[in-house]
Amino acid sequence: PVRFFVETLSAEEEPDARDGRRVVWVGYIQILDFNSRVEREVARALKRLQYSEEAVPPSSLILDLRGNTGGDLQSAVNIASLFSPSRPLLLVDSRTSSDSSPQTIDTRGPWTTDAALPLDLAELPVVILVDAKSASASEVLAGGLRRHCRAALVGETTKGKATMQEALPLSDGGFLLLSTKHFKFADGLSYDEGVAVDVPMTDMSALQESDDVNTQIFQYLTKQKSVCDK
């Protein structure tokens, strides 16, 4: 479910106090869906980007969630943990529990698995590409990192699927979809109407072919001091 590109999307050289010039380049990882394997695949892709032919780690990263309709929620939380560890991410209201208090889901602490990552992900500038089909777990990852000021969002407002549903079998062989949980970001903001983007861009179909699109994203990554700067 993960595609990544080691080749440079857009690169330029900028002055470096030690050797005069240094290469600046942007890594790209596409997550097609969320399942139990995706965080390991993202970790492998990040390590490949770290040791790419550019000989230096990427200066920033693009995560592509366009068309990703969601999947395993915990996988999205785990990937968010790579970039923003040990912080509240979601509030969950359960409609099947007698406890009316929302449950808080936090990102976990820094990764200590066998796939320990050499990149300083807590500081790496990130842009997340989303569109109107990005939903559910995609919105959790994109919107959560945006609320933490860890990622800028580029593309279209997301679908707005902030519920978890269970399929209840009916006597006629059909199913009834029952919404059992409702999600909000940790600050209480709902995303029922979608997650808004920082940089609207309705036509990103030529991302890999269009120098104009690549340049816009690259310039945003390299020149924006903070995604929360306005």
Image: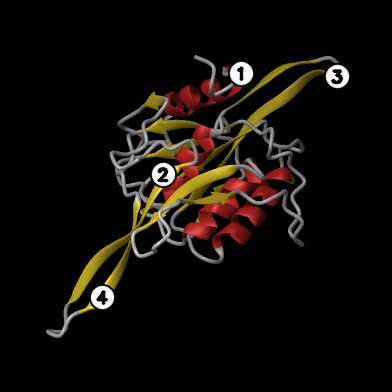
Give the crowd class for mark 2: few <14, some 14-19, many >=20 residues within 10 Å.
many
The image shows residue 128, relative to residue 140, as above or below, that is above
Q: CA distance from mark 3 to mark 1?
A: 24 Å
Residue marked by disc 3: 19
Looking at marks 2 and 3 on the same chain, the residue that comes earlier in the sequence is marked by 3
Please provide percent x and percent y for residue 61: 59, 36
Please provide percent x and percent y for residue 121: 68, 40
User: Which element carries disc 4, helix, strand or loop?
Assistant: strand
194 on left or right of 57? left
173 on left or right of 150? left
Please provide percent x and percent y for residue 155: 37, 33
The reply to whether residue 208 is in sight is no
The reply to whether residue 34 is in sight is yes
Give the crowd class for mark 1: few <14, some 14-19, many >=20 residues within 10 Å.
few
Task: Report the amino acid beneath label 3.
Answer: Asp
Residue marked by disc 1: 225
Give the foreground label among 1 and 4.
4
10 on left or right of 213? right
- Label of residue 184 in the image: 2
